[in-house]
Image: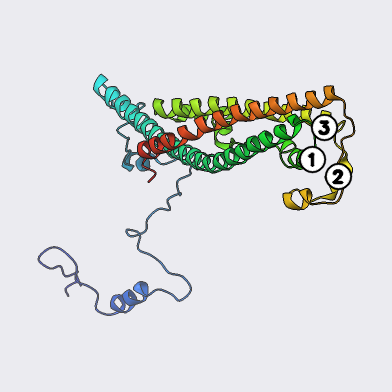
C-alpha cells in the first residue's frame, strides 16, 4: 500500500489546500469593524513637525535665498566705482532739480509781489495827482485872499468899509490850512519791509525814490505853512473881536459889507497892526513857495506813471 506523499508541481511548490485553507484565508484578510490594520509596507513613520527654533535641514536646503542687487552685505555682490558714481549722480540731480523748482517758485512769487507793489504805487500816484491839483487851487485862492487882506490893513485911514473887509478876509483866508496829505502806504511798505529789493528795474526804483524825496520836501513846506498860520492866529486874537467873527457868514461877503454893525479892532496900536501885516505877508510867501513845490511834484507824476505802466505792462 502506497503512502500518501505530498504532491508537488513542476516548480516544487505544494498546491494550495483545497478545503480548510481556502476557508481561513478570507477571514484573515477581512478587517474587523473595531480596528483597521494597515499593511506593514504601506505604513509611514510619524514625522515630527519642524520647530521654528530648530528647522529641519532639508527645509533649509530647499529654501531659495534671494539677495537684492543693492545689498552691500551680499557676499556675491561687489560695487565698483561706477555704481557709486551713478548713485551719487542721481542723488545730486534729484537735489539740484528740487532746488531749481523751489528757486523758480520763489522767483515767480517775488515777481508777482513786485508787480503788485508797482501797481499800488501807480494808484497812489494817481490819487496824489488829484489831491495836489485841489490843494494848489485852494492855496492860490488863499494867496489872492491875502492880497485883499493886506490892502485892507494898509489902507489909511481905515474906514468902516475897509474894516469890514479886514474882518471878512481874515476869517476866510488867514485861518485856512490847505496842506497836502500824500499817499504813503506803498512807499512805507517798500521801506519798512525791504520791498525795494524786489524791484529789479533800477530806473523804476530811482523814480520812486526821487518822488518820495520831493514829496517829503513838499510835506516840510506844508509844515511851514501850518507854523506861519499858527503865528498869525496867535497875534490875531489880540487884534480882532471874536464876537464879530461869530456873527456873520464868511461865505457871503455882501451881507458882511452891508451889515448895520460897526466893526472895530480890539486895539489901534500900529505896532500890533503892522506885526499882523508882516505875519500875513510871511504866510502868503510860504504858501506861494508851497504852491511851487506842489506844482513841481504834480509835473513829475504823469511821467512816473507812464514809465511804470510801460515797464510792467499795467495798461
Task: Give the residue pinned by disc 3.
Answer: 236
- Quadrant where the N terminus is found in the figure: bottom left
The disc placed on residue 76 is none
The image shows residue 23, relative to residue 264, as above or below, that is below
Q: Which residue is more in the foreground, 215 or 41? A: 215
Residue 192 image point, x, y percent? 59, 28
Label 3: few (<14), some (14–19) or many (≥20) C-alpha neighbours in 10 Å:
many
Residue at 90% of width from left, 34% of height from top?
266
Element class at badge 1: helix
Query: What distance separates the C-alpha of mark 2 from that of mark 1?
Result: 8 Å
Residue at 69% of width from left, 26% of height from top?
281
Left or right of residue 23: residue 270: right
Label 1: few (<14), some (14–19) or many (≥20) C-alpha neighbours in 10 Å:
many
Element class at badge 3: helix
Element class at badge 2: helix
Task: Give the residue pinned by disc 1.
Answer: 167
Task: State yes or no: discs 2 and 1 in contact (Cβ < 8 Å).
Answer: yes
The image shows residue 204, relative to residue 18, as above or below, that is above
Residue at 48% of width from left, 43% of height from top?
52
Residue 152 image point, x, y percent? 74, 35
Residue 198 image point, x, y percent? 46, 30
The disc, 2 or 1, on the residue closer to the chain's N-terminal end is 1
The disc placed on residue 244 is 2
Residue at 44% of width from left, 30% of height from top?
199
Query: What distance separates the C-alpha of mark 3 from that of mark 2?
Result: 13 Å
The image shows residue 160, relative to residue 270, as above or below, that is below
Left or right of residue 120: residue 90: left
Amino acid at each position: 500500500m502506497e503512502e500518501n506523499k505530498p504532491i508537488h508541481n513542476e516548480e516544487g511548490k505544494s498546491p494550495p489546500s483545497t478545503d480548510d485553507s481556502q476557508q481561513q484565508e478570507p477571514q484573515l484578510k477581512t478587517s474587523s469593524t473595531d480596528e483597521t490594520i494597515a499593511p506593514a509596507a504601506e505604513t509611514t513613520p510619524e514625522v515630527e513637525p519642524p520647530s521654528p527654533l530648530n528647522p529641519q535641514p532639508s527645509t533649509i536646503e530647499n529654501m531659495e535665498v534671494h539677495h537684492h542687487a543693492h545689498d552691500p552685505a551680499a557676499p556675491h555682490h561687489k560695487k565698483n566705482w561706477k555704481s557709486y558714481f551713478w548713485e551719487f549722480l542721481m542723488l545730486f540731480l534729484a537735489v539740484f532739480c528740487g532746488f531749481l523748482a523751489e528757486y523758480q517758485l520763489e522767483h515767480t512769487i517775488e515777481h508777482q509781489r513786485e508787480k503788485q507793489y508797482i501797481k499800488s504805487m501807480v494808484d497812489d500816484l494817481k490819487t496824489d495827482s488829484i489831491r495836489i491839483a485841489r490843494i494848489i487851487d485852494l492855496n492860490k485862492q488863499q494867496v489872492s485872499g491875502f492880497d485883499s487882506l493886506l490892502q485892507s490893513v494898509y489902507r489909511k485911514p481905515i474906514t468902516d468899509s475897509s474894516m469890514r473887509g479886514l474882518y471878512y478876509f481874515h476869517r476866510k483866508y488867514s485861518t485856512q490850512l490847505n496842506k497836502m496829505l500824500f499817499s504813503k502806504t506803498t512807499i512805507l511798505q517798500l521801506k519798512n519791509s525791504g520791498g525795494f529789493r524786489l524791484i529789479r528795474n533800477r530806473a523804476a526804483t530811482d523814480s520812486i525814490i526821487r518822488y518820495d524825496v520831493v514829496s517829503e520836501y513838499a510835506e516840510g513846506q506844508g509844515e511851514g505853512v501850518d507854523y506861519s498860520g499858527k503865528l498869525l492866529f496867535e497875534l490875531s486874537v489880540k487884534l480882532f473881536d471874536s464876537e464879530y467873527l461869530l456873527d456873520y457868514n464868511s461865505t457871503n461877503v455882501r451881507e458882511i459889507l452891508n451889515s448895520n454893525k460897526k466893526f472895530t479892532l480890539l486895539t489901534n496900536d500900529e505896532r500890533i497892526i503892522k506885526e499882523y501885516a508882516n505875519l500875513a505877508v510871511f504866510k502868503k510867501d510860504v504858501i506861494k513857495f508851497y504852491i511851487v513845490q506842489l506844482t513841481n511834484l504834480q509835473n513829475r507824476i504823469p511821467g512816473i506813471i507812464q514809465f511804470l505802466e510801460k515797464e510792467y505792462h499795467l495798461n
